[in-house]
Amino acid sequence: MPHVHDRALRTAVHEYLYIPPREQERTPSGMPLIDTGDSNQQAFHAMLATCLMSTWKDPNPLEGPEGSKLSSMASYFNQLGMRSDRLEIRTNTACRIASRLLPLHHPEHATVSGIPGLRLLGMNGHRVRLVHLPTGGRLDLIDSSSSRRTKDMKTVFLRETSWHDKPGSRRLWDTDGLSPQEAACTELWAPRPCSALRSALLMRSMPLWYAFDIQPAWRQPRPGESFPTLFWENDADEADTVKVAWLLTESPVRIAGASYVPDGPETGRLRLGDAQARLHSRFSA
């Protein structure tokens, strides 16, 4: 019976992705909405997945000279959920997350940190709304613990972004258009075959970070391969590559159309259409 299946899937989305049924966006057919089909939003998600899936050992180039702003961000997340027109991240520290995502220029290092092209769209007492100018991708940061007035939220935001004005940093997110430094980063959000795959990985990142207790990070392609490796160290069998691949390709919240081809006990290729990413775990104990 369709309604029984729908209820079971809503329960699975709650179990695996931590989104209660009452907070799940529904498709026109009544199914829980996990992934976006919008190519521009996918490109934005793909860039976020590339930035957030990083560690101090494997930092993203957008980490910036201040360090560990992106790689530690997952520890603040309570939930990631898709809406028809935006990604929502629930957190207890919405303004702090925004301060780490909004772009800065560091002239002494000739680098940009944060997400190039990200801008503040507005806020109220419990929500910080962001937009990515080049793609139009939307992100709302929802402060789960906030009962503030808009005025109070703005005060917290100003405090959390005060470090943006330290010597050696220049705000880029205060400008209306793209700065030359951001425009040079076009390759980061350009649509490509792997965009849908990375977007889908982002939408299933919470169980990777929390249920599996791993910190995956992107590494350069292996010799002879054109696709990158998503690598992590684990100290428990629950976080091995096969079990992570099962979540992504066979579980009730699997990536539709994705498959996994093992190349050994610790590594294999995750595929979606023409895109591939190598999954590789290493036992660290």
Image: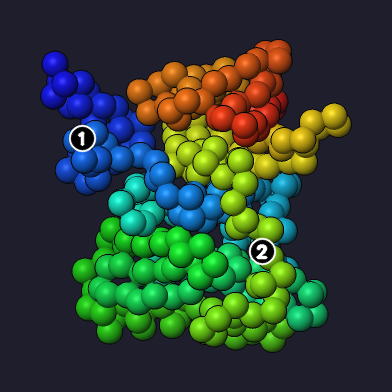
The kind of residue tagged 1 is: Ser
- Which residue in the structure is indicated by mark 1? 29
- Which residue in the structure is indicated by mark 2? 186
Are dots 1 and 2 in contact, CB under 8 Å? Answer: no
Image coordinates of residue 63 in percent, x first then y, are 67, 61
On screen, residue 257 above or below 28: above
Instruction: From the viewer's side, name the closer residue of 241 and 185.
Output: 185
Measuring 35% from the left and 23% from the top, which residue is drawn there?
A: 252
Cα–Cα gap, marks 1 and 2: 36 Å
Instruction: Say how the picture is coloured.
Output: rainbow
The kind of residue tagged 2 is: Thr
On screen, residue 52 above or below 155: above
Measuring 26% from the left and 79% from the top, which residue is drawn there?
A: 150
Image coordinates of residue 184 in percent, x first then y, are 72, 70
The answer to whether residue 235 of the structure is visible from this angle is no
Q: Residues within 10 Å of mark 2 (few under 14, many from 20)?
A: few
The answer to whether residue 107 of the structure is visible from this angle is yes
Measuring 45% from the left and 81% from the top, which residue is drawn there?
A: 159
Instruction: From the viewer's side, name the closer residue of 216 and 111.
Output: 111
Residue 265, quarter of picture = top right
